[in-house]
Amino acid sequence: MLNILQDVDEAVAPIYDGATVMIGGFGKAGQPVELIEALLRQGATDLTVVNNNAGNGEEGLAALIGAGRVRKIVCSFPRQSDSQIFDAKFRAGEIELELVPQGNLAERIRAAGAGIGGFFTPTAYGTPLAEGKETRVIDGRGYVFETPLHADFALVKALKADKAGNLIYRKTARNFGPIMAAAAKNAIVQVRQIVEVGGIDPETVVTPGIYVNSLVQVSREKEPAAA
Amino acid sequence: MSEKAVNTTVSEKLDRNSLAELVAGDIAPGSFVNLGIGQPTLVSNYLKPEQHVTLHTENGMLGMGPEARGEEIDGDLINAGKIPVTELPGASYFHHADSFAIMRGGHLDVCVLGAFQVSATGDLANWHTGAPDAIPAVGGAMDLATGAKDVYVMMSLFTREGVSKLVAECSYPLTGVGCVTRVYTNEAVFLLKEDGVHVRETYGISFEELAAKVDVPLIGPSAGTD
């Protein structure tokens, strides 16, 4: 059953201590800023966060990490020019990092949503990021076994939803949104606009409503933290 | 595409832009190409419209146009380096898993990447210096190195200390094994083939001088290219 909620605080209320939370976005594009800020206010802690990065600047995911709410981060690219909050926590041994090549991260998320128990990928074969993992040579090429990445919650931003939960995105802000919505038990989606059922052409739906659990309209978005 | 049948010792080292122009000219018409962050991005400045090259960006787009300026800037339209870009007619958007399936599935013709080191057998090291205090970050580097049909590296041939970055075996942690097919440097273009490292042409250095400074057996331009 789809919940259509009035505000972001209500939307993130079910997130509990120790949960695994996927957060969409790549840089500024697709970052669900208002949902992340609501999660910060909500206070859940000991979280495992899955995101491409580990926060930028002082706001959003960086603020969540800075407040000590994140026990572990699963990402491909934590180190950036303005990732000082993560850097300090990591060097102090206060956050665990699971570093995953970006395509493996995406495919592991996709696999979870698609019910796949794991897959062999050529990416990272023969590199330090394959150490300790099962490998196999198939038709003369080396592959590494990767497992699906599930989550309890996903925080996703889309452009528009109808009241059946069908989503469309905008340009490169789509990025991780569709696969995270499918991989999480509870996908919480912020959109700029919610329209009546039938207000989105079924041929253009990117995320079918079956993957969406909660919808909240955030019409006036804040400028995301610098990325 | 046939290799340029050149056997040249040009008098000057190539500058960054000339190197980018050289790479751009070597990309076959109609190719689907991913340009890595940093120096490889310069290649886009020299692709000619008549080449009909389609640029892929791993954050979910084919048909990427030039960097956005002024009113063109749109926060929802960025490249893998998080720089605002534009969209060309015929562009398409897709999610991250599809974007990396395009890459891993061998659908891209060429990927151009930077490097710390490349080995004679095409191993690539470009994500981690191995320094114990460094925070590792890999991004899409391993996927790019593994997926494209051809991986071209653009780099300076020598470190500031004058040590060759084309090596017998990489000392830095690997990004991919046996994946690099060509190395474009300011001093020479190298083709990595089954029978060894061919020098296609040199710039501001003779083949003999080059062979003396690079600790990898080199096959000279006179041996011919296919």
Image (cartoon, rainbow, N blue to C red):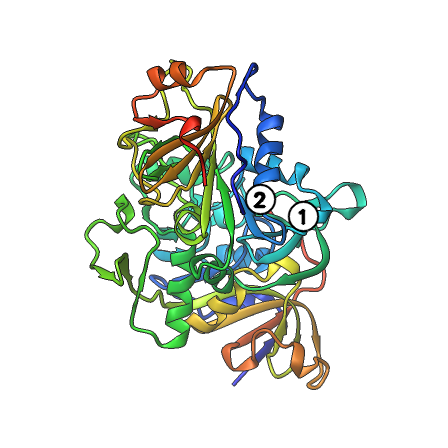
Q: Is A144 situated left or right of A187 in this image?
A: left
Label 1 crowd bin: few (<14), some (14–19), many (20+), radius 10 Å: some
Q: Which mark is residue B51?
A: 1
Residue drawn at x 58%, y 21% is: B15
Q: Is A51 situated left or right of A96 in this image?
A: right
Say which chain tag 2 marks.
Answer: B
Q: Tell me if label 2 and label 1 are in contact, CB under 8 Å.
A: yes
C-alpha gap between disc 2 and disc 1: 8 Å
Q: Is A119 situated left or right of B203 in this image?
A: left
Residue B26 found in image quarter: top right
- Estimate the x, y position of residue B167 in percent, counting from the top left: 31, 28
Q: Is residue B158 above or below residue B181?
A: above
- Estimate the x, y position of residue A203 in percent, counting from the top left: 66, 81
Q: Which mark is residue B27?
A: 2
- Estimate the x, y position of residue B139 in percent, counting from the top left: 44, 46
Residue drawn at x 61%, y 84% is: A164
Marks 2 and 1, the one that precedes in the sequence? 2
A33 vs B222, nearest the viewer: B222
| Residue furthest right as drawn | B71
B153 vs B144, nearest the viewer: B153
Instruction: Give the secondary structure at mark 2.
Output: loop
Amino acid bearing label 1: Gln
Amino acid bearing label 2: Ile
Residue drawn at x 36%, y 33% is: B197
Does label 1 lie on the same chain as label 2? Answer: yes
Residue A100 visible, this orientation: yes
Q: Is residue B108 above or below residue A113?
A: above
Instruction: Give the secondary structure at mark 1.
Output: helix
Label 2 crowd bin: few (<14), some (14–19), many (20+), radius 10 Å: some
